[in-house]
Image (cartoon, grey):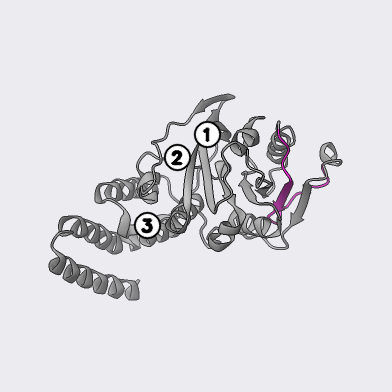
Amino acid sequence: MTTLSSIAVVVPVHNRKDELIRALRSVYHQSVPVDEVWVMDDASDVELFPLEQFKDWSALHYCRLESKFNANVARNKGAQMSQSDFIAFLDSDDEWEENYIEQCKLHLKPIEGAYFSQAKIVRLGEANPKKSKEWKDGMSAVNFLLDGGFAQTSSFVVDRKSFLHVQFDEQLKRHQDFDFFARYAAKYTWFQLPVCSVLVHWEENRKVTRDAQSEMLFIERFVDEIEPKVLKRYLRMQYDYFYENGTPGDYHLHQSLVPRIVVLLAFSEYKSFFKEQSVLYLNTIGLLSYLLLRLKSKL
C-alpha cells in the first residue's frame, strides 16, 4: 500500500436526503477510513444538514451551493476544496461495500493517473455485477465506453493534481462521466482495478432522462476516433430513444441535427475507407469540414 494515498470523497447531491444518508453510511463504515468527505449540496429544495448520525464524524464537510447548477459543478468545487492526494467520487444515490477503499488503496500509485472499477447494479434489492470489456493501454476511450466498456462515476478514483487539469465539463447535462473519462484518457492514464465493490442503484421504475444537446456535443467532440460501426449503432440507438421516449424539445432538437449526423457518419466512413489514401483522405476531410461549418452556421 502506497504512503501517498490520502483520499477525499466528493458526493454531489440535490434533494436526495434518504439516498445521501445511505451513501454516507457506506463511506463511514469503510474498513479503512477516508481522510475527507465533501457533501456538495447543489442548492437543494429540502434541508439536508445537519445529519445527527454523523455529527461526530470529523472528516465530514458540507457545502451548499447558492444556486442550482448541476452535478459536474458540485463535483469540481468539491475536488477544488479538498486537500487529499486522491479524489474518489460517489453519486448520492449509490454506495460502496465496506472494503471498497481498502481494496482501492492496494493499487493506488504515486503518479498522475486515475482508476475505475467494475460495479454491481442493484435492482429490486439484488446486486449483480455489470459485465464490462477489459480496458487496455492504448485503447480508444470513446470506443471502449460505447462498445461494451463500463466505467461509472462512483468508481472513479483520480489523482487530485491531474484532475484539476481536466475536471468535469460543467455545461454537459448528460454523458458527464463518458466525457471526463475520454478527455482524461487523452492526457493521462486510466487503470482498471480488479475490484467490484461499487453498488449502483438503477431502479427499474425510475425515469431515465437524456439530453440531445449534450449527447451530440459529446459525439462531435470525439467523432475523429469513434469507429464507424460503433458510431452508427450509437446514433441509431439515440434516434430510437428520442423518437419513442424523448421530450418534444429533445426530439425536435435531434431532428434539427439530422444533417449534422449525416455528415458525421460520412466523415467517419470516409476516414476509415481512405485512411491509406493520404491525398484523397485529406481532400475529403477538407470538403466535409467545410460542409459541416456551413451547416452549423445555418442551424
Q: Secondary structure at mark 3?
A: helix
Question: Residue 48 at what x, y percent from top left?
Answer: 77, 47
Q: Which residue is mark 2?
A: 150
Q: Nearer the viewer, residue 142 or 82?
A: 82
**Mark 1: which amino acid?**
Ala
Question: Residue 241 at what x, y percent from top left?
Answer: 38, 46
The answer to whether one can see residue 40 in this image is yes
Q: Which residue is mark 3?
A: 219
Q: Nearer the viewer, residue 272 or 207?
A: 272
> With respect to residue 52, does 14 lie above or below?
below
Does the magenta segment cover residue 263? no
Q: Which residue is mark 1?
A: 119
Q: Nearer the viewer, residue 8 or 243?
A: 8
**Which secondary structure dominates the residues rendered in magenta?**
loop
Q: Pick whichever of labels 1 and 2 is earlier in the sequence.
A: 1
CB atoms of marks 1 and 2 within 8 Å:
yes
Q: Residue at x 53, y 30 (%)?
A: 120
> With respect to residue 243, does 287 lie above or below?
below
Q: Pick whichever of labels 3 and 1 is earlier in the sequence.
A: 1
Disc 1 versus disc 2: distance between alpha carbons?
8 Å
User: Residues in magenta?
Assistant: 32-51
**Mark 2: which amino acid?**
Phe
Question: Residue 162 at what x, y percent from top left?
Answer: 56, 58
Disc 3 versus disc 2: distance between alpha carbons?
17 Å
Q: Residue at x 13, y 62 (%)?
A: 277
